[in-house]
Image: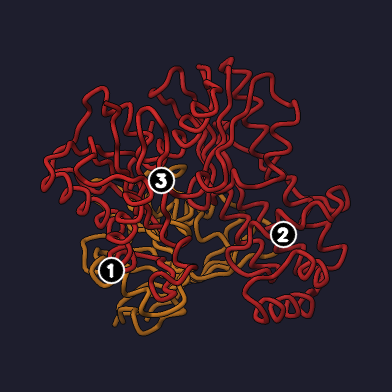
Chain colours: A red, B orange
């Protein structure tokens, strides 16, 4: 009998549940904010903190089980994010998972959210028949994380570098807001970047003291602020904010119409520097570690410019990205990370705690 | 009310000032970090957390997305960023009033937008860039 694992994720903004099978891979993956747009919960978009998680958790788990054609009776274990994240948010998922574990006598498995992001790639590549070779590198980049790990073998992690200030996704979102594209606007910048000339605006690369594989994006963010201030762009930015207020779903053509060529150039330059900051660390880490594969995951893995640049033959080894739905926060990655722990019998008991500052290595 | 103005020439001096300031006030202590994007709020937070032995400087990163970073075991520094929050209700939901009662330093970014939630006894650190590496840093102690 293949094993079925229910995964639950509530570490930050998203409430998510998923069912993963040891044989057949991901059977379902439900994220509350995605189905909320279908007005399932009266249009309430669950975000920010425990009350929204509390509202969403029961329907999201039910939906994940239904879509998988599974019931609590058919599960082998329940897995849940134990950290890092907001304690109040983590507690909702943890408490729900513990209740399921106790009521159904199912083993409970605690999963590190960042390890989950890496497993999003591992489970998808297995399903596609492309087995990730080790040693591997994993870059997890999102609104809240920018971590670079070496994986000597599956399940072992060594931290090679991390951000000392802003996360890569945060830099995208804050610069987007600065330019009047709203928050979070990282994906808008990614879509506009190919329309500008990255060589037309000079932006600084970070200079790291100490660990050269650490990241820093605050200097770049500040350089963008100075670039905007030097140009007196208030009217242009106000015009874009007006565009933003005019509609909820703006097309890229509408954004292009509100964005002059000089600003498109700055966006292109910004996008290129962020991508290069990430890829240069990977270049160096790949050389140091002799990696056989590179994994890129987290919300920033949705960035099309990053995907193109990383898969254009730059690296001597294959580069794996998750599909967009598994790049951002989800629970399939939590259940996927739990499969190995399940087979090794690594179970938690009901004293499992929320760990806000949990690290992977 | 007590007010002091400092000038720092670069990141290292800003961190060093944070180290001195963090150790200065008895806990519980609420410190507002005020300044626009790029003013150095996360930089001075590094110094404050390191100065009280809660974390190494390089451990302290921006809490914008996760809202709250905790440092020390037991937690002696909370670094909280309300940038992503729009309403007082949202701020209340992250449990700020409870955190502010703990025996810890609570660093708050973008909290001046929500005056009703601020304790009358607090420190405000206002940071401004000189357009380059330098920062002017005004420290105001409100006695409550």
Q: Residues within 10 Å of mark 3 (few under 14, many from 20)?
A: many
Q: CA distance from mark 1 to mark 2?
A: 34 Å
User: Is there one chain holding both mark 3 and mark 1?
Assistant: no
Q: Circle 2 sits on which residue?
A: A224
Question: Can you tell which of label 1 and label 2 is closer to the viewer?
Answer: 1
| 3 and 1 marks in contact (CB < 8 Å) | no
Q: Secondary structure at mark 1?
A: loop
Residue B7 visible (yes or no): yes
The label on residue B95 is 1
Q: Say which chain tag 3 marks.
A: A
Drawn side of residue A66 relative to residue A136, left or right: left
For the C terminus of chain A, the quadrant is: top left
Side of B6 relative to A360 (left or right): right
* In-front residue for pair B35/A361: A361
> Going by the image, does B5 lie left or right of B50?
right
Name the residue located 46 percent from the left edge and 17 percent from the top edge.
Answer: A152
Residue bearing the label numbered 3: A28
Query: Which residue occupies 43% across, 25% down?
Result: A158
Please tell me whether residue B100 is drawn above or below residue A115 in the rendered image: below
Task: Please state the horizontal and vertical placement of residue A20, each as a whole percent of the image.
Answer: 36, 38
Where's residue A347, x and y in %?
20, 32
Circle 3 or circle 1, nearest the eye:
3
Position in image of residue A22 (x %, y %)? 35, 29
The first of marks 3 and 2 along the sequence is 3
Q: For the residues labelled 1 and 2, say whether their Cβ atoms are less than 8 Å apart.
A: no
Residue at (47, 58) in percent of width and height = B65
């Amino acid at each position: 009998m293949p094993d079925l694992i229910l995964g639950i994720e509530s570490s930050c903004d998203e409430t998510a549940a998923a069912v993963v099978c040891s044989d057949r891979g991901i059977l379902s993956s439900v994220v509350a904010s995605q189905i909320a747009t279908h007005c399932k919960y009266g249009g309430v978009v669950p975000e920010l903190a425990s009350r929204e998680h509390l509202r969403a958790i029961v329907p999201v788990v039910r939906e994940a089980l239904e879509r998988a054609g599974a019931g609590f009776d058919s599960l082998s274990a329940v897995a849940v994010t134990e950290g890092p994240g907001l304690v109040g948010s983590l507690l909702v998922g943890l408490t729900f998972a513990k209740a399921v574990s106790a009521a159904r006598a199912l083993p409970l498995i605690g999963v590190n959210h960042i390890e989950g992001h890496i497993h999003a790639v591992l489970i998808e590549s297995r399903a596609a028949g492309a087995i990730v070779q080790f040693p591997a590198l994993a870059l997890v980049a999102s609104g809240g994380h920018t971590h670079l790990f070496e994986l000597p073998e599956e399940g072992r992690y060594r931290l090679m570098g991390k951000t000392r200030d802003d996360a890569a996704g945060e830099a995208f979102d804050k610069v987007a807001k600065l330019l009047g594209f709203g928050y979070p606007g990282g994906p808008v910048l990614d879509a506009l970047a190919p329309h500008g000339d990255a060589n037309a605006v000079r932006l600084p690369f970070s200079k790291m003291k100490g660990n050269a594989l650490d990241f820093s994006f605050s200097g770049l963010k500040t350089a963008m602020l100075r670039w905007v201030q030097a140009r007196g762009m208030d009217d242009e930015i106000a015009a874009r904010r007006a565009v933003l207020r005019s509609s909820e779903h703006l097309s890229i053509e509408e954004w292009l119409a509100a964005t002059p060529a000089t600003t498109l150039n700055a966006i292109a330059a910004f996008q290129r520097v962020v991508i290069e900051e990430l890829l240069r660390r990977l270049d160096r880490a790949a050389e140091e570690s002799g990696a056989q594969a590179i994994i890129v995951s987290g919300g920033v893995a949705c960035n099309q410019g990053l995907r193109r640049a990383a898969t254009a033959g730059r690296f001597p080894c294959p580069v794996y990205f998750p599909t967009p739905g598994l790049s951002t926060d989800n629970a399939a990655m939590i259940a996927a990370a739990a499969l190995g722990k399940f087979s090794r019998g690594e179970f938690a008991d009901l004293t499992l705690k929320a760990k806000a500052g949990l690290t992977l290595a | 009310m007590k007010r002091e103005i400092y000038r720092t020439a670069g990141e290292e001096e800003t961190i060093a000032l944070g180290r001195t300031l963090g150790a200065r006030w008895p806990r519980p202590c609420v410190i507002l970090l005020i300044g626009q994007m790029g003013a150095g709020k996360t930089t001075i937070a590094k110094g404050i957390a390191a100065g009280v032995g809660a974390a190494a400087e390089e451990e302290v990163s921006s809490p914008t997305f996760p809202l709250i970073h905790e440092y020390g075991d037991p937690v002696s520094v909370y670094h909280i960023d309300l940038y992503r929050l729009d309403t007082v209700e949202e701020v209340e939901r992250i449990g700020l009033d409870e955190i502010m009662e703990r025996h810890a330093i609570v660093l708050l970014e973008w909290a001046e937008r929500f005056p009703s939630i601020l304790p009358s006894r607090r420190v405000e650190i206002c940071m401004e860039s000189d357009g380059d590496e330098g920062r002017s840093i005004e420290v105001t102690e409100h006695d409550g």
